Image (cartoon, coloured by chain):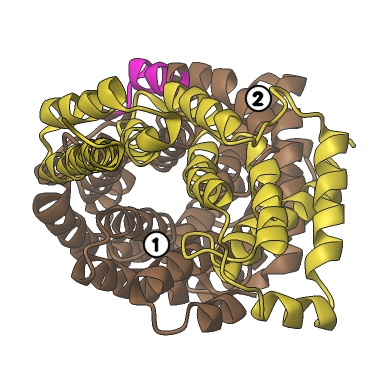
Amino acid sequence: MYSMLDLFSIIYCVSCFVRLSLELFSQSALVEWALGNTEQMMSSLDEVFNNANCFEDTLRTAHVKLAYLRMTGNCLAEAIAYGFKVLEHLGETFPATPENGIIVQEMLDTKELVTGSSNESKLRSLPEMTDFTKKEAMTFLEEMLLCCYQSQSIHFTLIACRMVRITLQYGRTKTSCVGKMFLHDFFLHLYSLSLRLNGGSFCS
Amino acid sequence: MGKTSMILAGSDKRLLCSIMYRVYALINIWKEPIQAILPHLKEIYNTSLKYGMIDYALFSGMSFAYRAFFTGSLLQPLRKEVALYMRSNIERHKRSRKLTHLMVVPIFNGISCLRGSSSGTENAEKFITEEHLAEALRNKEFMFCESMLAIKMMCSFIFRRLDEIKATVRQYLELFERQGSASAQFINIYRLFYGGLLSLHFYRESRDQFWLDRAAHAIQKMEVWTAESVWNFENKLFLLQAERHYASGEMDCAAEKYKLAQESSKKHRFVHEEALACELAAAFHVKAGNENAIVVAELIDRAVTCYQTWGAEGKVESLLLSP
């Protein structure tokens, strides 16, 4: 006869083993990808998707899949749709067809938050991000930023602004470090916007 | 901004690679002399490889190839560098990261095309087909599609295979004009530059307002960009303006702008665009009939010398054979 404590220990151990094997499949997918064995990579990814207990268990694998789809050269539309779906699960939604006015306003608002000497010093001293969901969201947002760059999508701007806001609210992460994300991609698009405004081809 | 970001990255080399890639490949091209960016991209490529950042290595190598090709790096050494890059990296990751492979192949073929028949493909129509462009578009790979279009327009314009590309240019220029308003990417510069030159040529032939509108858009963009970086854009703007004056029959203004385009290209070290400016100026003077034969011959000689310096032997051959 097992005591309740033993039972909890067993459940805990099984749960740890499941997580460990999912993690191993995820790592295996990465290795197969690096080696160019895409079929084996997909098979490892499927193992994780089919055996995961919850959405959080699939996040690492979903990121590998998204990066793979982006780099294949013929699945960008699929990658973008997939990325937005994952982001929605993580609580980050975006309009399907954002209007120019919304984008301009978003950029101007975000600019307010990051420019000026006081804001810049605040940026430099942001704490590390601890919120798990937001950290994951930042990882996917980074990948989606690249997808949108490749597809020349107007969502690029909205994603960059979202990353700035998450960073300001929840702190910085390694993947979306202060400089990397908003000081570059954001200002690249701010610059693009100013070019468009100056060029007169952009109506807000 | 970029410098601040690099400071923030601190000693994390992997993070630094990704930041430097963005700063040099995507942002500084709008501000700093573009030739000065190339060594940095090589450095990022090497560092990324060293720290196992395959994607950044592939992308920085690819960005280097594109930037070096379009900004007039010497074709012979560039061809070797691109070939080495393809052999050592692209082949290895061809299946898993097909996009970088797909994007570098047209550059390699473009270089071969300009180098001449002994080096490989002669005609951009053959290595970038309608089907290639349509497929990229179907897959929403707008950046890839625009890159192929720019290479195709550049090669076709330089080799004066203008009628062959007319339908393609008509189909895609307007599309990218709309699409491109959502982005500020390196390839936009050369799609607009060669698209503008082609549009003005077609406008001179047909007086179709469609072409004048495309050219006006290209000139307008180039004016904005020139205000940001005289070094990178002034010569292109002068050349587009010269062609527009020519198309409008403003011959004195055109002659002046051709001269400025040549001077600016030379000053800012765009040897291929200097060659183009000389060649187009020579064609203008012949058509206008307002210059003596010596001036035209001098311009052609200078164009040949510049094309030779660049390493475009294929073009030199065709220029010397043309009447």
- N-terminal-most mark, 2 or 1: 1
Q: Position of residue B277 (x, y in %)?
A: 53, 56
The quarter of the rendered structure image containing the C terminus of chain A is top right
Tag 2's secondary structure? helix
Q: Is residue B133 magenta?
A: yes
Between the residue at mark 2 and the residue at mark 1, the CA separation in whole angstroms equals 27 Å
Q: Position of residue B158 (x, y in %)?
A: 41, 43
- Mark 1 residue type: Gly
Q: Are marks 2 and 1 in contact (CB under 8 Å)?
A: no
- Chain drawn yellow in the picture: A
> Which residue is drawn at the image coordinates 51% and 30% (left, top)?
A86
Q: Colour of chain B?
A: brown
Tag 1's secondary structure? loop
Question: In the image, which residues are magenta?
Answer: B128-137
Give the class, few, some or many, for how many residues have Cα within 10 Å of label 1's Cα (few <14, many ≥20): many
The residue labelled by disc 2 is: B174
Please give the label number shown on residue A140.
none
* Chain name for mark 1: B
> Which residue is drawn at the image coordinates 48% and 52% (left, top)?
B279
> Which residue is drawn at the image coordinates 82% and 64% (left, top)?
A113
Most foreground residue, A118 or B76? A118
Give the class, few, some or many, for how many residues have Cα within 10 Å of label 2's Cα (few <14, many ≥20): some
Please give the label number shown on residue B72.
1
